[in-house]
Image (cartoon, rainbow, N blue to C red):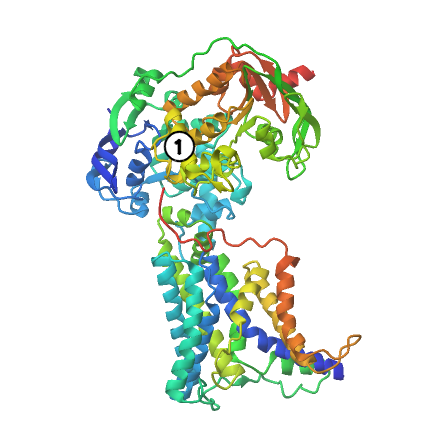
């Protein structure tokens, strides 16, 4: 049963580690499907994490923290929109700028407000999102196989985890079953078709970016208010980029995005679990190697194992009305 | 006269210093097909974009059904029953037909009811107008003719009573164009008003009731189609007399310069596109290859010019074979005197982002005339570009202008000047006048004949039957990858048309 328990634990942390990736990946899906490349997912998550932890610490409320995280993250998304939609700037440059501003401003403001070396105060219970225990989880905990699966994997996560996974079918539904989704997909492929159909390209893309902002806000809040008990500088640690990789890996499809993020989460979880324990055949491997593994695998997967990933055709190109 | 569906009164529109439309007046009667002709850049598309709400006029009045209206967005135009089929289709390529039809005309926030409505509505339109198309087909998998039909359906679905078509036949095969015209006539019979923008005069004569001619931003004349001639319209368009069929003497065919034997070429999917084709081109003659687009002409050209790999067969240039394995260096072929004007000037013939002078030496930039040691000799290149601009009447005559800013006809002249001025022994030309105005067509045809008269071997591939008949000394017809017949320049259109449709081919087999 030891191996079974180990697997359950790895899967449990897979879920926990996948959540910020999944939220960021779906966030990127909205903007990229609308034709806006968003390399600033990382930055928006970071400001979300900082804003969430700060507000939660000051107002002693997890919900206020979450709301603030979303608000600030959306604000940054709108800045990206203002630069790349209204002013037709380069989307990569704007995204990179947002990442820099996010990395710098969170540390400076954190230090100025809380004087803890860029950290926010440790969050108390009630200021964080607590784990939800599903009915009967404790009762069947000791039932073999099913017990641990229900109690560990399904039950016992925070509301944001369930929210993240619920966003997968929801995003699919929005994309393929609603007018907004149809138009959003169209504007990412051929904005001129949308324009001549009498729909505002700019307003459509702004709305997609607002969706992106909301999701990166939640992803940030998850990092600083669920996974961690407060904000630590640079706590996103490249997750925004991994999410972008997962998005390509998933070919811009929501359900694929979930599996891609679970895979990356699993690699992460496995590398933590296997740190320090000797592997068969190779023996003991340095911890750094295990930490690097998910990234190495990302490169390999993206380099050729996914077949042809065709991005939305109008992606990255500002829309200029012309004939 | 029937009531006017559209009246444009005193329309002016400028883009910066360019006056695209000046004091335009136009009246289109309800239930008629009205043609607007003019050279590229005459302001036809601008005028129609104003009517469709894509641009706003600087001054002037628009009346629809007798009432003055203000059209500031495409939505306003759609609400007034104006639909437009753009030259470059406004379709989302990876959407289905249904998704494209409902885009922007959805019933409510969810798609379900819109799709159901569109499906039944498409069914009705199909019955009423014979506009058949599979509603669940994905656009990029449909041939262009059907994609255009989807554009028309889109407009009709939105309740269009007035339909504007911008250069609708530019991308169509002759058969598809004929089908389009049948559809347009049917729409007219149902009371729709149609405005057809084109620079192909034959189409105007074939289908319109009235025609207006634009030149350099002004409306120069309006005629009843029955009472005018192609010659008169061409003269009005260009502002001078135009030769619609170039005059040329007998050809004096010399030695074989280009010889193609049993050439077979497959496309990237492995489908045989050129099937065992053999022919010769002699010095001093123009050989024209006619055929409906997609019957292997493009692949044939590409194989001869060393861009595409051939499966078997051989091609001899001046008696020596050229490499057909796909490793042939087009540069080496140029050195051996083979010049190639590709069919697709935008993607193959030119780098649109380059300046004119750069494009005018592209491919020949290693020639020592243009070099000073290891560097480009900018002065020599400029002088050379100016020389070509003068000789080929390329307008505007600015060698520093970005190539994308030239009109289609002038871009084509840039490519032709580059290839012809190298004095090649063999010239292969794909679609010499695609998207080119009447005036420039005349010029290009004269140039090609001058090449012939200098004793060069010229191979022309064109889907324009008129062009092939006007230029060629010998006509080869391709159908399904094979050369199905050879005719002289006096072959009738009907005879060639049958060959192009593969009819003769089947009879011969019986």
Neighbor class of circle 1 (other Cα within 10 Å; few <14, some 14-19, many 20+) is few
What residue is at 41 percent from the left and 89 percent from the top?
Answer: A115
B52 above or below A15?
above
Number of numbered discs on residues: 1
For this view, does A209 lie left or right of residue A264? left
User: What secondary structure is found at the residue carrying circle 1?
Assistant: helix
Quadrant of the image occupied by residue B324:
top right
Outermost residue to the bottom: A124
Q: Where does residue B47 sit, x and y in percent of width and height? A: 29, 36
Instruction: Give me the chain letter of mark 1.
Output: B
Residue labelled with disc 1: B383
B190 above or below A310?
above
Q: Where does residue B154 sit, x and y in percent of width and height? A: 42, 42
What residue is at 57 percent from the left and 22 percent from the top?
Answer: B501
Quarter the C terminus of chain B occupies: top right
Quadrant of the image occupied by residue B195:
top left
The answer to whether one can see residue B183 in this image is no
What residue is at 49 percent from the left and 74 percent from the top?
Answer: A219
Quadrant of the image occupied by residue B83:
top left
């Amino acid at each position: 049963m030891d191996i079974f328990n180990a697997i359950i634990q790895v899967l449990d942390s897979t879920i926990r580690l996948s959540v910020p990736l999944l939220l960021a990946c779906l966030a990127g899906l909205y903007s990229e499907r609308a034709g806006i490349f968003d390399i600033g997912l990382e930055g928006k998550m970071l400001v979300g994490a900082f804003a969430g932890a700060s507000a939660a610490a000051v107002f002693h409320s997890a919900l206020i923290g979450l709301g603030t995280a979303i608000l600030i993250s959306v604000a940054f998304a709108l800045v990206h929109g203002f630069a790349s939609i209204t002013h037709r700037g380069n989307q990569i440059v704007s995204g990179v700028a947002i990442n820099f501003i996010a990395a710098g401003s969170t540390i400076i403001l954190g230090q100025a407000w809380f004087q803890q070396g860029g950290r926010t105060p440790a969050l108390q219970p009630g200021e964080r999102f607590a784990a939800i225990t599903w009915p009967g989880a404790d009762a069947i905990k000791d039932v073999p196989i099913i017990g641990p699966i229900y109690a560990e994997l399904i039950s016992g996560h925070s509301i944001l985890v369930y929210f993240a996974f619920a966003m997968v079918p929801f995003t699919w539904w929005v994309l393929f079953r609603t007018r907004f989704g149809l138009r959003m997909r169209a504007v990412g492929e051929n904005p001129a078709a949308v324009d001549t159909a009498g729909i505002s390209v700019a307003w459509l893309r702004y709305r997609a970016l607002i969706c992106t902002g909301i999701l990166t806000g939640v992803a940030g809040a998850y990092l600083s208010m669920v996974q961690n008990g407060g904000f630590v500088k640079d706590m996103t640690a490249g997750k925004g980029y991994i999410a972008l990789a997962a998005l390509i890996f998933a070919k811009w499809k929501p359900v694929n995005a979930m599996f891609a993020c679970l895979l990356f989460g699993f690699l992460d979880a496995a590398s933590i679990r296997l740190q320090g324990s000797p592997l068969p055949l190779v023996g003991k491997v340095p911890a750094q190697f295990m930490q690097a593994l998910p990234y190495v695998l990302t490169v390999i997967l993206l380099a050729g194992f996914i077949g042809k990933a065709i991005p939305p055709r109008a992606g990255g190109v500002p829309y200029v009305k012309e004939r | 006269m029937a009531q006017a569906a559209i009246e444009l009164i005193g329309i002016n529109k400028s883009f910066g210093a360019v006056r695209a439309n000046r004091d335009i007046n136009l009246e289109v009667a309800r239930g008629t097909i009205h043609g607007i002709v003019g050279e590229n850049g005459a302001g036809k598309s601008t005028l129609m974009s104003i009517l469709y709400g894509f641009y706003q006029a600087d001054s002037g009045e628009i009346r629809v059904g007798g009432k003055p209206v203000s059209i500031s967005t495409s939505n306003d135009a759609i609400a007034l029953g104006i639909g437009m089929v753009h030259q470059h289709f406004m379709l989302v390529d990876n959407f289905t037909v249904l998704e494209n039809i409902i885009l922007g005309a959805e019933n409510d926030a969810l798609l379900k009811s819109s799709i159901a409505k569109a499906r039944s509505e498409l069914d009705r339109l199909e019955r009423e107008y014979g506009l058949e198309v599979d509603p669940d087909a994905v656009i990029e998998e449909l041939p262009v003719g059907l994609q255009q039909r989807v554009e028309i359906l889109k407009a009709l679905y939105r309740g269009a009573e007035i339909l504007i078509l911008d250069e609708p036949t530019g991308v169509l095969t002759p058969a598809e164009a004929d089908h389009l015209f049948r559809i347009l006539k049917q729409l007219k019979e149902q009371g729709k008003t149609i405005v057809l923008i084109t620079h192909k005069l034959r189409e105007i004569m074939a289908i319109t009731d009235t025609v207006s001619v634009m030149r350099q931003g002004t409306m120069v004349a309006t005629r009843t189609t029955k009472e005018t001639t192609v010659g008169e319209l061409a003269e009005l368009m260009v502002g001078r007399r135009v030769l619609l069929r170039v005059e040329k003497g007998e050809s004096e065919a010399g030695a074989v310069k280009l010889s193609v034997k049993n050439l077979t070429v497959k496309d990237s999917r492995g489908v045989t596109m050129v099937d065992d084709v053999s022919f010769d081109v002699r010095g001093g003659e123009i050989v024209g290859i006619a055929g409906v687009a997609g019957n292997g002409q493009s692949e044939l050209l590409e194989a001869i010019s060393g861009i595409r790999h051939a499966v078997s067969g051989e091609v001899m240039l001046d008696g020596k074979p050229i490499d057909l394995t796909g490793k042939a260096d087009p540069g080496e072929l140029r050195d051996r005197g083979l010049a190639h004007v590709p069919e697709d000037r935008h993607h193959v013939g030119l780098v649109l982002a380059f300046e004119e002078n750069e494009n005018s030496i592209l491919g020949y930039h290693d020639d020592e005339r243009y070099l000073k040691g290891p560097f480009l000799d900018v002065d020599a290149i400029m002088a050379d570009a100016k020389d070509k601009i003068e000789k080929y009447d390329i307008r505007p005559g600015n060698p520093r202008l970005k190539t994308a800013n030239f009109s289609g006809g002038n871009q084509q002249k840039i490519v032709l000047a580059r290839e012809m001025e190298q004095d090649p022994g063999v010239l292969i030309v794909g679609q010499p006048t695609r998207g080119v105005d009447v005036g420039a067509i005349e010029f290009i045809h004269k140039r090609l004949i001058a090449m012939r008269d200098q004793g060069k071997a010229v191979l022309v591939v064109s889907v324009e039957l008129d062009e092939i008949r006007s230029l060629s000394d010998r006509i080869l017809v391709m159908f399904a990858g094979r050369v199905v017949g050879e005719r002289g320049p006096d072959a009738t259109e009907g005879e060639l048309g049958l060959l192009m449709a593969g009819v003769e081919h089947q009879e011969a087999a019986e």
